[in-house]
Image: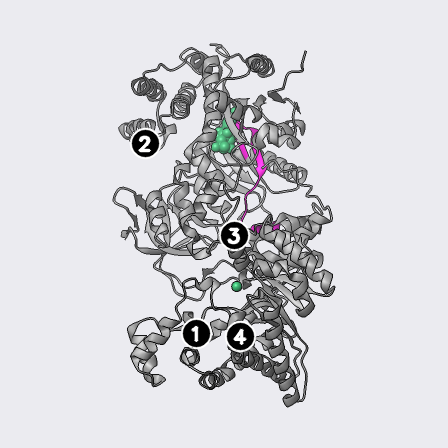
Amino acid sequence: MPSLERWVYAFGNGRADGSAAMRDVLGGKGAGLAEMANLGLPVPPGFTITAKLCIRYLESGTFPDHFREEVDRHLKQLERTSGTRFGSSARPLLVSVRSGAAVSMPGMMESILNLGLNDDTVGGLIASSGDARFAYDSYRRFVQMYGDVVFELGKGPFETLLEKARRRRRVQRDIELPADDLAALAREFKAIIRARTGKGFPDQPEEQLWGAIAAVFRSWRTRRAIEYRRVHNIPDDMGTAVNVMAMVYGNRGDDSGTGVAFTRDCSTGENILNGDFLPNAQGEDVVSGTRTPLPLSRMRRGALGKVYRDLERIATKLERHFKDVQDIEFTFERGKLYILQTRRAQRTGVAAVRIAVDMEGEALISSDEAVQRVPPQDLDQIFHPMVDPGSPVTVLARGLPASPGAAIGEAVFDADEAKALADKGRKVILVRPETSPDDFHGIVAAQAVLTARGGITSHAAIVARGMGKTCVVGAKDIEVDVVRRRFRVNGRFVRRRETITVDGTTGRVILGAAKLALPKVGTHYAKLMAWADARRRLRVRANADTPEDAKRSREFGAEGIGLCRTEHMFFEGNRITAMREMIVATDEIGRRRALAKLLPMQRRDFEGLFEAMTGHPVTIRLLDPPLHEFLPHTQADVAKLARTIHLPVSRLKRLVNSLVEANPMLGHRGCRLGITYPEITEMQARAIFEAACRVVARGRRVVVEVMIPLVSHVEEFRRQAQVVRRVAQEVFHAEGRAVPYRVGTMIELPRAALTADELAKEAEFFSFGTNDLTQTTFGLSRDDAGRFLPFYVEHGILPDDPFQVLDRDGVGKLITMAVRLGRGARSELKVGICGEHGGEPRSVHFCHRSDLDYVSCSPFRVPIARLAAAQAALEEAGVINRTRATV
Ligand code: ADP
Ligand code: MG
Ligand code: MG
C-alpha cells in the first residue's frame, strides 16, 4: 500500500508533531504554535492542517479521501486533551479556526473564533462559566464572524445591528450590552444570514468546522490577499495552513483579556517589552482597532501584575529561543496566561539596526549575523526626514508614534481617493477612524497614515511599519467624519485636501506643511556599517554631479565618484547660453569661442568635486546627451538666444530644427559628439586636468578617471582617448606637474560588451552603464516603456522591471562576458557599474558574484549598497542566519 500523505499535525500539552522548521508545511502561525508547545509554553491544544492542501483544495474544490478521517481523529484527540466535547451541552468544545501562511500576511486572511456554539452548547458554556453575558457575547461573535467569513457577507450588516443595540442601551462598548441583548443579536445575525443567502446557519459543530476550514482556504484568494502578495512579492502558489485550536476566553470579566506584545520597541529598537491589551475582550478587538487598547505597562501593577510577569518571562524565553524580536499574541482567562501566536516582529529600519547591534552585544547573534539581519533597503528609512525641531508648528493632536518619519500631504478620507490622487502625482495622507485590510491600496498610495483609534498593534500601524511608511494611530482628539470627508479636532475642522504633516516619530499631527530636516544617525548605525564595511569586497561609489552631491555621498560612505555627468553642469545659470552658442556655431572657430567661455566654469566644478572626494577616484563622463536637449524650444527662448548671439530668428529656428533627430537615444550623442567635434572633448579634458593640477597644487591627492560614453567600436574609443591623453600631456607640461589618471569607457551598447577584449586593449577601465545597456539590450526605450512594462511585470512576462532590478539572464550575461573578455586582455582592468542598479540589493549581489570592483549609485543609496555588498560576501562565505524564524 502506498504510504498516505500527512495533512494534519497536532500540538499542545508540552509536545507537537511539528516544529519551527516546518514553516512551509504548517505556515508561520502553525510552526510557531508547534515550537512553543515543544518548549512547554502555555499554548491551548489544537492541530494544524497543512498549507499543501490549500491550492489543491482551491483547484479541485474537494478534499482528499482520508483527510476527513484524519481531521476526525485529531478532533477526538483534542476532545480528550481538553476534557470537552464538540456539541456537548455540558462541557462544549469550542475552537478557533485560523489562517496562517508561511509568510506573514497580517490581517489579510480570515479567522473564526468560538466555533462549536449553537443554542444547545451555549447552555453548556453558561453552566460551566456561570456567566450568561460571556456565553452570549461569545455566541454573537461566532455568528458574526461566520457570517462574514463563511457566508461572505462582510462586516457591514452585523456592525450596523451592533451599533443599533449600543445606541438603544446608550453604551459605548459591546461588553456593556446585557446577556439578553447579546442573545438577541446572535438570533438577528442568523436571520440576516438566512435573508441574504437563503441558507440556514449550521447548528452541527462538525458542519460548522468544515465550512470554516474551506472558507479559510478560500480567503487565500481574496482581492486584498492577492494585492498584498503582489506588493510584497509573495508567491501565489504557497497557500495558507489552517489552525484549529481550543478556545481560551479573554472575555470572561476583568481578570481576563487579550493583547499583543513586542519583546522590544519596533519603532526605535529600544529593549523594552511593550504592546497593547484590552481587558474583557477577545483577540480581534485589539487588532481591529474598534476599541482603543491600553498600553501593556498598565498590567504591571495591580490585579494583573502576575499575568504581566508571566508574560515577561515567556517573552524573554521566546526571544532568546528564536534569537529575534517577537510579536506575541496572548490571552488571559481569569488570571491564567495563554500564548496564541509568536512571530518575528516587523520593525522600522531604525529599529532593525539597533536591534541587530544590541543583540550582538547581548551575545545572541554574531556581528556577521547582525549584518545579515537588516534588510538593506530599510536603511533608507534612517535618512527619512523628521520635523525640524527648531521650527514652530501648530500641533492639532497627538497620537501614538506607530512608524517614524515625517510626511506632508493632503488629507483624504478614503482609500480609493488616496490612490486616485496619488496616481495623479499628489501627495496624500490617509486619515481614517481606523483602517482595515480593505484600505490596503490607500495605505500603499499615501505618504502617511493617520487614524483616530487603534493602538500600536492596530492594522494601520502594522501595515505602515512593514512598508516603512510614516504612521500615527490612536489620535483620540480627532473625530473623523468619513461621509463629509473632514475631521474635527478641538473645535476646528480640517477638510479634504487640506495640507497636514504627520510626525510618526513623536506622534504629532501638525497643521500645514512643517519644515522637515534629516535626523542624525546614531552609534548603532555606525557600528553596523563598520562591520559591513569590513566584510564586503565590492567598493561603493556614488553618482554625483555637483560638489554638494559629492560631499553628501562622502557622508554616506562613498569611496569615490563612479559617474559624474558633466552635462548637468551646463544647465546652470547663464551657462546654457554659452552652451547653446557652441551648438549653433556653424564652424570650428565659432565653437571654440563658445567653448572657451565654458572652460573656466567646468574647471571650477571639477575642482569642487576633486576637493570633496579627497583622494578617492572621480570618474568624469564626457558630454553624452544629444545636443538638441540643450536647445531653446519656446518662441521666447529662441528669440532671446537670437538676440544674444546676433542671429536672425528665422536662421536660428532653421538651425534648431536641423538638430532634431528621429531617434535621439540612438542618434548623435555620446562619443559621437566628440568624434565629430573633437574640440568639445578637448575643452572638457583641459578643464578636468587643469582642475586636477590646481587641487594637487593645494596639497591634495587626486585620482582622475575620464570616461568615454556610448562607445560601440574600438576605433571610436581610440580616437577620443588620444585627444584626452594629448591634452593631459599639454596641461601637465604647462603646469609643471602630473596627476595620475585613467581613460576608460562606459559599456552601454551590446557591441561594446561583445568586443570588450578589443576595447580593453585601449581602455583602462570599464563602467557598465546599465540604464542604457538595459535599453539597448532589450531594444526598449525607458521613456516609452510605461505603456507596456507594468503590464509585463504584472502578468509575469518579466519577473521585475529591468530598470529597477538588473536583468541577470540577459544584460547580466553581457556583463559577465565583457568582464571575462576585458580582464583576459588586460588583467588589471578596473570594472564597475554606474546605473540605477548599483543601489538595488539584488543587483548588488549580482555585481559581487560577477567579481566587479565597485558599484556606483545615487548618494542616498550608498549605505544600502554597502550593506548589500557585505551580505553578498557573507552569503558567499556561507554564514547562515541562525534565526529560527516563524514569521
Ligand atoms: P490574525 O492573523 O488576524 O491575527 P488570528 O488567527 O491570529 O488572526 O486570530 C485572530 C485573533 O483571535 C487573535 O487575536 C488571536 O490571538 C485570537 N485567537 C485565535 N485563536 C484563539 C483561541 N483559540 N482562543 C482565544 N483567542 C484566539
Ligand atoms: Mg494573529
Ligand atoms: Mg548612457
Residue at figure coordinates x 40%, y 71% from the top left: 659
Q: Does dot 4 land on a helix, a strand or a loop? A: helix
How far apart marks 2 and 1 lie (CA) works out to 66 Å
Residue bearing the label numbered 2? 171
* Residue with the mark numbered 1: 571
The stretch of residues the image draws in magenta is 329-355
- Choose the circle earlier in sequence order: 2 or 3: 2
Count neighbours of disc 2 (C-alpha within 10 A) and say few if under 14, some if 14 to 19, many if 20 or more: few
If you read the primary sequence from the N terminus, does the residue marked by circle 2 or circle 1 appear first? 2
Q: CA distance from mark 2 to mark 3?
A: 65 Å
From the top left corner, tell me how far across and down residue 353 is, in percent: 60, 52
Q: Is residue 701 left or right of residue 103?
A: right
> Which amino acid, by three-letter code, is at mark 4?
Gly
Res. 778 mark: 3
Q: CA distance from mark 1 to mark 4?
A: 19 Å
Q: Secondary structure at mark 3?
A: helix
Other-residue count near label 4 (Cα within 10 Å), few / some / many at <14 / 14–19 / ≥20: many
What residue type is disc 3 on? Phe
Q: Which residue is mark 4?
A: 674
